[in-house]
Image (spheres, rainbow, N blue to C red):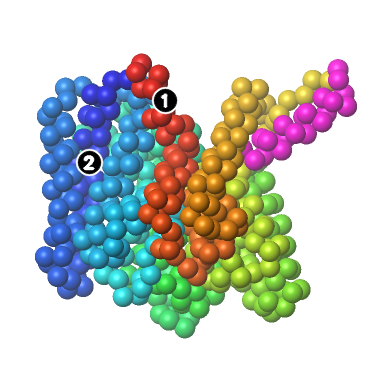
Amino acid sequence: MRFQIILDGMGLILILFALSFLGPIWTGVVYHEDPYRLFLAYGIPIILCLGTGFSIRVLMHERFEQIRVSEALVMVALTWLVLAGIGALPYIALGAVSDAASAYFESMSGFTTTGATVISGLDDLDKSLLLWRSLTAWLGGMGVIVLSVAILSRFFGANINTVIIQAEVPGGRVTRMAPRMAQTARLLWGIYVLFTVILIGLLMAVGNWGEHEMSLFDAVNHAMAAMPTDGFTTHDKSVGYFDNPAVEFVITVFLIIAGTNFVLHYNALRGRWREYLKDPEMRFTILMVVLAIVFVTGDLAVRGIYSVDQSFRFGSFAVVSVVTTTGFATADFALWPVSSQLVLLMLMFFGGTMGSTAGGIKMVRVLIILKSIRVLFNKVTHRRGVFHVKLGNVIIPDAQVASTAVYVLLYMGLIGLGSLLISLDGTDMVTSISSTVTAIGNVGPALGMYGPATTFAAMSGVSKIIMAALMWIGRLEILGCLLLFNPKALAE
């Protein structure tokens, strides 16, 4: 493992990351926040990023463009830990949290697009800090390093190794949309920005139809939290604060967009709309979402929790929010019937599609596992037959099926370990398991003690760090993070 190359890449990312603090500074100036507090919150991190980044670049004489696969995984994993640490500084400087563990939890929750929070009183929080929360989510959604690759290749002509992008992009696998991977990175971010801008415009158009008007600031923040499927909001009541069905509908549509493979969006923008329904994973996702909405809506209506139309309104929003691992809320589903909560918990496991900004196991892995079970039954009943796992007309190699099964087992094992560790905090089983699932799946709210209407502030410092670690592992698809704990791999 050539740590000089890894550090060289991290130094360059830190230099570019310093630019992200300019938005909150400008916001603070516009809203007349105290300049000294702004300097403490954002000026010091800028100095820290630039000073550290340039120092590393001067000391290292290697070129990170020549990085190997294992080195890229380690670089991305370490960079995310460092960026979350620097991103935690504004929370402490502005007094939003009282301890380092809470600040790191909040920062990691943003960058990993989890949306879990320890902060209450959002309505009175500094505007610059609200923007910083949303900005960390927006940057983390498509990837800080993927953005850096797009900038470096466009303006500085850097020849970036493909594995750097693959190590960070959601899903861990990139389908080329252009001859060069750097061009693919720019296309991904271009589509991401386009949808964000469109969402802002639509939210502004319908934002005054509810109980509370959605301002431009609210629209920008909610769009920057929706597209990365994060769920950070500007009000304690989340999207429910606006009590606006039109806003909920628009956000629901864009959560579905965000939770869908961006390669399909690229094809659609080029006029190939049928690719959505041709994709087996997308068809499976639609089926799961429709069934979940029908079940939850019926469950809520039959039990008399809400009227039929309200059951559909709140139920469909919760289903889409959870399956895309966003965490926006219009109702406290922790108070719903256990049957509906179990459906939502299952959707937390599944997550969105591969190549989207959603977390979770990913629908394609669930589909491969289900098809593998069917193949196994066929082999038992037809011993001389030859059967393969197929997605559409594509045969999935046995090696890929095996790696999928291993990934799911690792995922489940980490949920078991995380649940055990969090239960040591004195939490009940539902709270422990759902907190772990929501962290590693980058979902946001849990069930039990930490539902949509509450925060994770009551957790101990140790549990918050465990949750932050689970968010990090889940966002980076496990492998790169586990490499850091493999001495043999680090020594190579």
The local crowd at label 1, few if under 14, some if 14 to 19, many if 20 or more residues have their Cα within 10 Å, is few
Dot 2 and dot 1 residues touching (CB under 8 Å): no
> On the image, numbered disc 2 is attached to which residue?
14
The residue lying toward the viewer, choosing from 106 and 297, is: 106
The amino acid at mark 1 is Asn
Residue furthest to the right = 381
Disc sitting over residue 486 in the figure? 1
Q: Which residues are magenta?
A: 365-384
Query: Which amino acid does the dot numbered 2 rest on?
Result: Leu
Q: Is residue 246 visible?
A: no
Earlier-in-chain disc, 2 versus 1:
2
Asked if residue 359 is positioned above or below residue 456 in the image, the reply reads above
* Helix, strand or loop at mark 2: helix
Taking 484 as reference, is 329 left or right? Answer: right
In the displayed structure image, the side of residue 121 where residue 34 appears, left or right: left
Asked if residue 4 lies in the magenta stretch, the reply is no
